[in-house]
Amino acid sequence: MSEVVTITGIATGGEGVGHLADGRAVFVPRSAPGERVRLRAGSLKLHRKFGRGEVGEVVAPGAARVTPPCPHYTQDRCGGCQLQHLSYDTQLAAKRAIVGDALRRIGKLDVADPEIVEAIEESRYGAKISMVVAGRSDSKGFPIGRRRTVGLHPYDRPGSVFPLVDCHITDLRLMALWRELRQHLSLFPERMSRLTLQLDRDGRRHVIVESAGEPWLRAPKLRAAVPDGERVVCWWQPEGGAARVVAGPEAGFPATAFEQANPEMGRIAQRWAVEQLGDVHGRMVWDLYGGIGDTAGLLAERGAQVVSVDADERAIAWARQQPNLAPVRFIAGRAEDVLPSLPVPEVVVLNPPRAGLHWDVTLRLTAAPVPRVAYLSCDPATLARDLHRLSVNYHLTAVRAFDLFPQTAHVETVAVLEAA
């Protein structure tokens, strides 16, 4: 008889968590808080301090479980979302708990679970989707070995790929483009390994192909074959190289620059962060990992003297061309490399990638404390780690979570610090 487990919460990756009879924690994907599940026979994998299993039967359903709206979620066990089987209120509560747990357990901070700002839209918010490719075709589009499949990974079989028909968290304009592209897979490179679709803030749609071998020579034909192709830009990125435009206008928004998957909610988080910094008029502000300059623009509007740093040269080049960002000084380079050349700041805004702050940035901020710091993070664990490192000279004054990624376990968090 398989073990029956009571699910008490949602863990960081979106899995339900309960306890086995021997007291070990057990993580169970697609389970819901408050329900009792029987683990599928043979699915339980035991480790020294925890286990992992699969739902075999929901013995006692919980009020949090709902019917997932996307067929891929159940039929293909899509790994792109983790929480579609939960009501939206339950998703929000889970994300608050994930952030709070990380801050207490990793950050050693005495804080409650933070408030969370719910998403404007629970679906169709995504301005970007990245798909993987299994199999390949020859130059005439005929399969080599096996049929080429473009789609996503099942959560429990990361080495497999199922063909994507529709992604319910992705903007309809990108899904309309995907419906057209699926009919022209023979026009893509033979050795394509990844296909990314992105919607920019000017309404143009970008098709970014990663492949080995020859450049994407048939991109102009693809662009001509899809409706409204004049607003489609095709990019080719060789393995280990930089992406470049191969069909369509090169001027305009750089699709390879970092942009939030949910730009509207991202701007709400940025505004809140800037508001918490108080009066920045006339103050020197560092905007580190600043991307295309959205936060820098908000700071400049408030009269700050802003230096914005990002390693992406395309993002910096685009930002320098924007009239509203003219007062901002943009520097292309890694934050940890350019810090010694920057003027002494009174305020710092941090928006690092998922890996968190480079150690040299942390050392600079602790060696010479800055009066106020705002830290925007997409990973509660690395945020908590960095806040713990900074706690030698700073104390946390405000923290708030933002649901930029409904239906998934991801969450954005903004933490505000003051020098101790």
Image (spheres, rainbow, N blue to C red):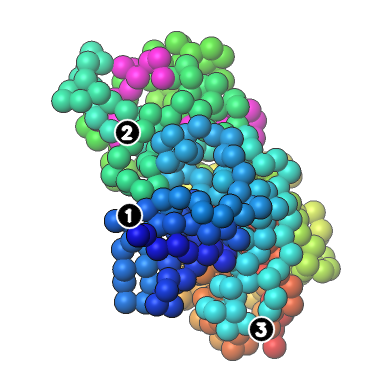
Who is closer to the viewer here, 124 or 246? 124
Q: Give the distance between the C-alpha atoms of the residues marked 3 and 2, in whole angstroms.
A: 45 Å
Is 199 within the magenta?
Answer: yes
Nearest the viewer among 164 and 351 is: 164
Within 10 Å of disc 2 (Cα), the crowding (few <14, some 14-19, many 20+) is many
* Mark closest to the chain's N terminus, 1 or 2: 1
Q: Earlier in the sequence, mark 3 or mark 1?
A: 1
CB of mark 3 within 8 Å of CB of mark 1?
no
Horizontally, residue 410 falls left or right of residue 135, namely right
Disc 2 on helix, strand or loop? strand
Q: Is residue 109 magenta?
A: no
Q: Quadrant of residue 164?
A: top left
Left of 363 or right of it: where is 391?
A: right
Give the labeled residue for mark 3: 110
Question: Tag 1: residue type?
Answer: Ala
Residue beneath disc 1: 41
Residue type at tag 3 = Asp
Q: Are marks 3 and 2 in contact (CB under 8 Å)?
A: no
Type of amino acid at the residue the image marks with label 2: Val
Tell me the tag on residue 133: 2
